[in-house]
Amino acid sequence: LREKFCYSCCSLFEKIDENVKLWDCSDQAAIRSYLCDEEDGVASVAAEGRGRGIEEVRDPAGSADNSLPAPQAPPHQAQSSAAGSRGRRGPKMCAYCHEKRAMLKRPKTKECVCKECFYLAFEEEIHETIIHEKLFHRGDKVAIGASGGKDSTVLIHVLKALNERYDYGIELFLLSVDEGIKGYRDDSLETVSRNEQQYEIPLKVVSYKDLYGYTMDEIVAQIGLKNNCTFCGVFRRQALDRGAVLLEANKIVTGHNADDIAETVFLNVLRGDFPRLTRCTNSITGEGGPLPRCKPFKYTYEKEIVMYAFHKKLDYFATECIYSPQAYRGVAREFIKDVELVEPVCILNTIISGDEMKLGNELKPLQVQGECTKCGYITSQKVCKACKLLEGLNLRRASGRM
């Protein structure tokens, strides 16, 4: 392999070209052109907050307009290419329409596509998930969990567009939770307020302080950084339920994407939480209860959400929670990202594996949803986790422990 290229190096989108598998290493220009490297227009765009590569096919002339014709190569470059094993190829065309120049490479499929085809494919895949999983019914009042981040902002944009395009007949609301984290949530709520005006969808904000008597900053001051995400996650899930009741919504939609669901699968494996493992990949959770939760992004990759939000120039908040670096979920997230670099389809395979996992005939579900005896909200235990956590906080406050 010192002077020749193997099949793996010369494969593009799982296709082997018999003419290039034995190219000589000295013809670097032709090889880079074939493999669509930087000289031919592929750039690596770091995924938001991750440093992971999202590939984008650039116009060789530096123009964002993919309808412009390809510039002619200078005569001396043409002669140089002709002297090699093979000359430079023309601009790469969209794998879908075959008419416009490819501007993006999809992380999910590794296909080079134009922006317009990427937008359409991205939205249509979400539409297929909604239809196949039967997430909505005509007349539903749907509360969208809006945090101001990329996932929820893209969810608002796409749901509004698909509802108008395919006439789902659903009524949309924005529902935000103010955890009381200064320097983070107060700024992101400003983004949500702008989204309310941009998409003309009514917004409801509920806060930890009003519901539980504590802000997240106050909770961290008491318990420290070790288990703060446990408190926040439990309180936020119940806060969404309470906010949806105030909006008279009958469904909640969240922006959990394929990466998030795959991470949850591995988290439940690490914790040995088999009951949650059997249901964490469901596109609808709590289906038999009063407020089912839906995940239209179940099969949507995080990198593609970032690309969609970036190229659509959507208004979203990009800062990470100041307390999240301590979260245990980060272990599963790093593992998923490392495996994705080797084989991107691993995320979908993880979700499919979770879907296929069933309880044995001799086993019964260990948790059945009911109502909390204290607050009356949905729980699988006699007293919900939120009430238990609040009881602990109140005891610490009463004893003066900080």
Image (cartoon, rainbow, N blue to C red):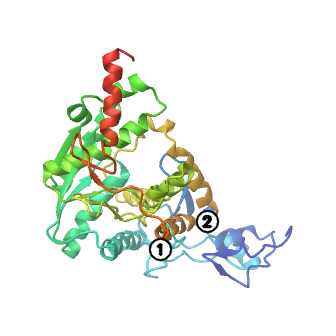
Residue 155 screen position, x and y as percent? 31, 59
Number of marks in the rendered image: 2
Residue at the spot 59% in from the left edge and 52% down from the top edge:
335
Residue 87 screen position, x and y as percent? 68, 78
At label 2, counting other C-alpha atoms closer than 10 Å, the crowd grade (few under 14, some 14-19, many 20 or more) is few
Image side of residue 19 versus residue 144, left or right: right
- As drawn, 329 above or below 91: above
Q: Which mark is residue 343?
A: 2
Question: Of all residues shown, which one is farthest toward the top?
Answer: 400
- Whichever of labels 2 and 1 marks the residue nearer the N terminus, that label is 1
Residue underneath mark 1 = 101
Residue 20 screen position, x and y as percent? 73, 79
Q: Nearer the viewer, residue 227 or 306?
A: 227
Image side of residue 52 versus residue 18, left or right: left
Q: Let me know if residue 107 appears in the view.
A: no
Residue at the spot 69% in from the left edge and 83% down from the top edge:
17
Q: Are marks 2 and 1 in contact (CB under 8 Å)?
A: no
Q: Amino acid at mark 2?
A: Glu
- As drawn, 344 above or below 219: below
Question: Of all residues shown, which one is farthest toward the bottom?
Answer: 18
Q: Secondary structure at mark 1?
A: loop
Q: Amino acid at mark 1?
A: Arg
Q: Quadrant of the C terminus?
A: top left
Q: CA distance from mark 2 to mark 1?
A: 26 Å
